[in-house]
Amino acid sequence: MAEHDWEKTDAFRNTEIPYWLLLAVSAAFVAAAWFFYSNRHAAGHGGPAFVVKPQYYDISPARTLKKRLETEGMACGDCHDPSAGPSSSDPRVAPEVHSKVVLKHGPNNRCFNCHNNAKRDFFAEDGGGQIPYLKVETLCRKCHGTTYRDWTSGTHGRRNGYWNKAAGEQKQLPCIACHDPHSPAFKPMLAAPAPRKYTAPGVKH
Amino acid sequence: MADEKDQHDSPYFHPKPYGSGVTRRQFLAVAAAGAAAAAAAALSPLKDLTQIPTLRQFLQKHYTELTPEEKKEILGRISAEVREKYGVTPHLTAQPPLDGVQFAYALNMGRCIGCRKCVYACVNENNQSRDPQIHYISVLEMEKGAVNVETSNTDYEGQVPKKGHYYMPVQCHHCEKPPCTKVCPVKATWREPDGIVVVDYNWCIGCRYCAAACPYHARRFNFKEPYLPKEDLNPEMGYLSNRPRQVGVMEKCTFCLHRTRAGKYPACLEVCPTGSRKFGNLLDPDSEIAAIIRDKRVFILKQERGTIPRFYYFTDV
Amino acid sequence: MFNLFKFLRLSAAEVLDGDWRYYAWMSGLALLSLAGLNAYSVQLVHGLGTTGMSDHVSWGLYIANFTFLVGMAAAAVMMVIPVYVYHDEPLHDVVIFGELLAIASIVMCILFVSVDLGRPERVWHMAPPPLGKFNWPDSMLSWDVIVLNGYLFINAYVAGYLLYMKFLRKEPLKILYIPFVLLSIVWAVSIHTVTAFLYQGLAARPFWHSSIIAPRFLASAFTAGPAFIILTLQLIRKFTAYRIADAAMLRLRNVVQVAIAINLFLFASELFKELYIPDEHAVHMQYLMFGLHGHNGLVPWIWTALAIEAVAIALLMLPASRSMKWLNLACVFAVVGVWIEKGMGFIIPAFIPNPLGEIVEYLPTLNETLICVGVWAFGFFIYTAILKAAVPILTGRLRLGGVPYTAEAGMEPGGIPKPDFGAGFRPQGARWVDPGPPGR
């Protein structure tokens, strides 16, 4: 067990606290107080805040359908006499007036596979029937059956509005709202900005 | 006289040599005063503390224990706070889960092009902080040939999709066995009966254990006071979803609870240009989500973690 | 009851009384603690954004220090077992210092967790129902709250009881402390196991999701803790009258020898498992040891830690460390090495890369470091104060009936006015020593 050897512990008791220590400690506390008081970080966000531009969350579909086409159907009747009969020119060659149309629809390079040769304001049903503009999915499903199947069940293509049809309207987009019928492959788009990596001061990433 | 002489002769006597030091008492007094001054100065930054909770806010009970009257009062109080801060009167709801509904989400990996519109639609809808920037959705640019997140990349820019890559957005998967709700020490995050994993922002203590436990990096923490410009506020709010949050609490994707419990689609789905996002009620056989689970090839990210997510990735076939 | 007040009053007086070195040390620690308090005030105002943490690395230096200090607290058991189970003589006189260290360590642990909280005023939410919503038994954090506070209580009670009985010069009743001591053996292992399970249970973090974590924690705790206690005992020897036999130090040295060997072995085992046939999960170890995709922030840390621990184990195994000089060096290295390996080298790599493969590195900010320094300084302050009161009680000088010895009391034992001496005066022998028979 420890002995009563207080000499060792108490020897220092006879030393007084040196002045310089008192001064140093006082100075340190005062300096600390001054430092603490002035240690006020700037409030608010540093640097310009990220602006979420409306185009990043623009809800409109990939293609802009021309209004007149949506409501009135195709404008073929502007040039073509609706009662004119079938064309006799090469069905693979688009006339000069239609030169702006870029046809890249895979192996489907016959205009009249889709367009109704007899009635230019309609699309071509198998057997010569007429598919109105607003029922364009009936046309596409002639070849894209599986996609049409998925479109009707909701698996393909975007739906907007209500998942709960009892609570409100569920809007479905026609095929050509997203796919350009003449070159249906999706064009690359510009991605919205990447996330700003959170960095603490001094950390490189 | 004799006493004095004795005193001087006593081996104990020694005149106090002034000037060589101070007594302990004096030192302690000075040190205590100095320490008190320094302590007061140390606490001085608290002057800038703007958000001291009121007693009512401080004592607010857990969301699941609130009576309807208390809920109403709290919603009113929060609406008032939003009105004061943003100048807009919000429409704040606290909708209960719907009966016979189990929400699930599916994402078509064959069709996502990585445009990130879902990310920003979510930000716009859910009143997220612009600075520090909070995104609930991370879009991974994956290398074709495998599903390997280690070789993926979230900071791609420019025209998408890029050759040789495909895209996989990741957000909260609303797991059936969520590790985040298991580890929360105060049950501030829990799974609602309709499948949505929610956070009570007024109950969270900010320990970030849930963030460590989530295998999908879905949870976000407010390291600073969130900054949201007034004009960007979405006034359609839910208590458990997109009402403005405070510093020091967790948040995450809520499947746009304020929209979906009213029967609407989540914001991320509505904006997707390729229609890759699908959402609905698993229990409804006519819903697109049930059709996907039934007919499509579905897989789950990090399935081996055993969390049983309600977020499925699928391809068209 | 009055004796208890006397005990507390005299202990307090003892804490306030010391020489210039003691005052300088305590003033310095007080200053650092206040710096930490100031930095924490800034953090309270601005949020945890004043730290270097992010959504990617959401736990940092605070939790690293917390993990290390839980280990230090648990190390008391490595003295309790030899003394109370095997009746080891040399350690008998020093086991209380381990218990006192546990008290200071647990206080620091609680402080570190508190400063890490985003909403500290909501701590009451952890109360059991009906007040709060304590998520026991699901959440390991809830277990941690229970075991840490329980351990603090056990150690405070046992140490307090023993010191109080020594003060009263009464024999402590075995029934009132032996059961608690034996409980503390199990409890000490449990605090560190629970803390290990905090990490071990997370399937989302493959770096932690390994059964070896709990054994590693215990091994590193029993390396750093007894090493720190050896260093403390050296200081007690140097500055007080308390006699500590070399045999006690050497027994502790044995503990550290075994523990550091096991610790390094377990680390090597982890390393082998990750790197022999690396799978996807090996990226974390790769980041830690070699860097990943150009990010190598932690590489110097871990290699330094391993080098330091290698030197420590070499020194400890050599007979040279039987001499105090080399033993001290080895102990300092052991503590520092384990701190790095268990702190930065364990907590941070689990977050890099994150579950989605992203890499965001972590570096603590000045504010964060100041808070850590402040908590450590406060812990040292408490530990020094506790020891300052405890040692005189243990030597027998501070006891009931002994005349309170304060420099300015003006009283010399026996009622003679105390004379004033200049600096450095050493009185002769026995006249200063005995205050007289007990019962005054």
Image: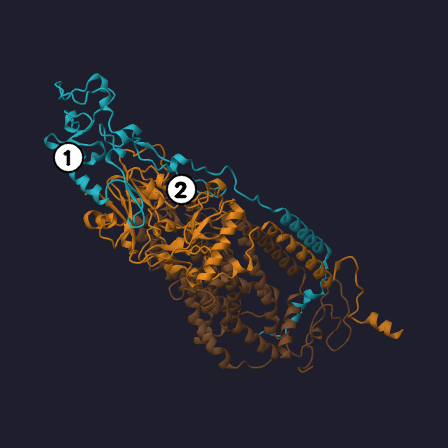
Chain colours: A cyan, B orange, C brown
- Residue sitting nearer the eye, C79 or A67: A67
Q: Is residue A26 above or below residue B24?
A: above
Instruction: Name the image quarter holding residue C399.
Output: bottom right
Name the disc covering residue A143, or none. Answer: 1
The amino acid sitting under disc 1 is Cys
Q: Chain of mark 2?
A: C
Helix, strand or loop under label 2:
loop
Which mark lies nearer to you, 2 or 1? 1
Few, some or many residues within 10 Å of mark 2 (<14, 14–19, 20+) = some
User: Which quadrant of the rendered structure holds the C terminus of chain A?
Assistant: top left
- Residue sitting nearer the eye, A120 or C407: A120
| x and y percentages locating residue C300 in the rendered image | 43, 46
Instruction: Name the image quarter holding residue A145.
Output: top left
| x and y percentages locating residue C256 in the rendered image | 44, 63
The amino acid sitting under disc 2 is His
Q: Is residue A102 above or below residue C301?
A: above
Is B25 situated left or right of B61 in this image? right
- Residue sitting nearer the eye, A144 or A137: A137
Q: Which residue is mark 2?
A: C295
| x and y percentages locating residue C258 in the rendered image | 40, 63
Q: Chain of mark 1?
A: A
Please tell me which residue is depicted at 44% across the width and 74% down the height of the picture: C183
Q: Residue furthest left?
A: A127
